Amino acid sequence: MSKIIKKFILAILIVTFVIFLSSIVTAEPTLNSVTTDPEKPEPLGQVTVMVNFTGENILNVSGIASECSDQTKSCYNNTFFDMTYNSETGLYTTTFTLLDKQGITDHIQWYFNVNDSGVTYNIEGGKTYLNIDTETPSNGNTDSGDSDSDTPGFELILMLAAIFLAIVYYNKKR
């Protein structure tokens, strides 16, 4: 009877081992890098995005570029795109144009949908900050940042008020 039990245990171990080896374990794809050309895009400029993923059988990659503002803490102007695989570089690439016409976008937030072996994974891709030059102030002053002269004419109003008060005071003394 012990010989039958040993054969039965051996058979169970062999079947378990075969089942264990035949099961397919797929790992979630990982995002290695996101680079843009230009590195810091201009507002309303064209951006080429290059993404490096590691995965077992990536079938396709698509994504969303959200134009965001740290000041307003909001994102808007979502651009949906499909990416093409470049076998020479091993990168997924796409090109699109930024849409913000109000000038409040300071970075792009990336989201990618990666189809790996028929399963779609949503992967957050981080931020790319835009190359924002200091804009002309709303008062039209284009000085080099001298804060004493940011509002032209304000001193003139104070000077005219002082002259008016001096004239009134002088006329009362007479």
Image: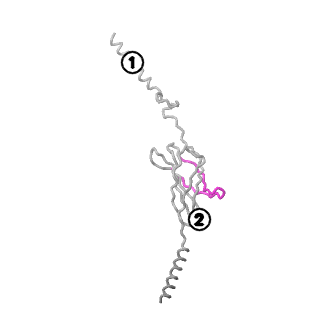
* Identity, as a three-letter code, of the amino acid under mark 2: Asn
CA–CA distance in space, label 1 to label 2: 82 Å
Is 98 inside the magenta-drawn segment? Answer: yes
Question: Nearer the N terminus, badge 1 or badge 2?
Answer: 2
Circle 1 Cα neighbour tier, 10 Å, few/some/many (<14 / 14–19 / ≥20): few
Q: Residue at x 50, y 85 (%)?
A: 6
**Which residue extends farthest right?**
88
Query: Residue 60 appears at what percent x and percent y?
Result: 58, 61
Query: Residue 100 appears at what percent x and percent y?
Result: 52, 46
- For mark 2, give the secondary structure: loop
Query: Residue 54 appears at what percent x and percent y?
Result: 57, 60
Q: Main secondary structure of the magenta part?
A: strand
Circle 2 Cα neighbour tier, 10 Å, few/some/many (<14 / 14–19 / ≥20): few
Numbered marks: total: 2
- Mark 1 or mark 2: which is in front? 2
Q: Which mark is residue 164?
A: 1
**Which residue extends farthest front?**
2
Query: Residue 155 appears at what percent x and percent y?
Result: 44, 24
Q: Which residues are magenta?
A: 77-99
Residue pointed to by mark 2:
57
Relative to 15, say whether 90 is above or below: above
Q: Quadrant of residue 166?
A: top left
Q: Nearer the viewer, residue 78 or 132?
A: 132
Q: Which mark is residue 111?
A: none
Q: Residue at x 39, y 18 (%)?
A: 164
Is 42 inside the magenta-drawn segment? Answer: no
Relative to 18, say whether 69 is above or below: above
Q: Nearer the viewer, residue 118 or 81?
A: 118
- For mark 1, give the secondary structure: helix
Identify the image's colour scheme: rainbow, by chain, secondary structure or one colour. one colour
* Identity, as a three-letter code, of the amino acid under mark 1: Phe
Q: Nearer the viewer, residue 172 or 39?
A: 39
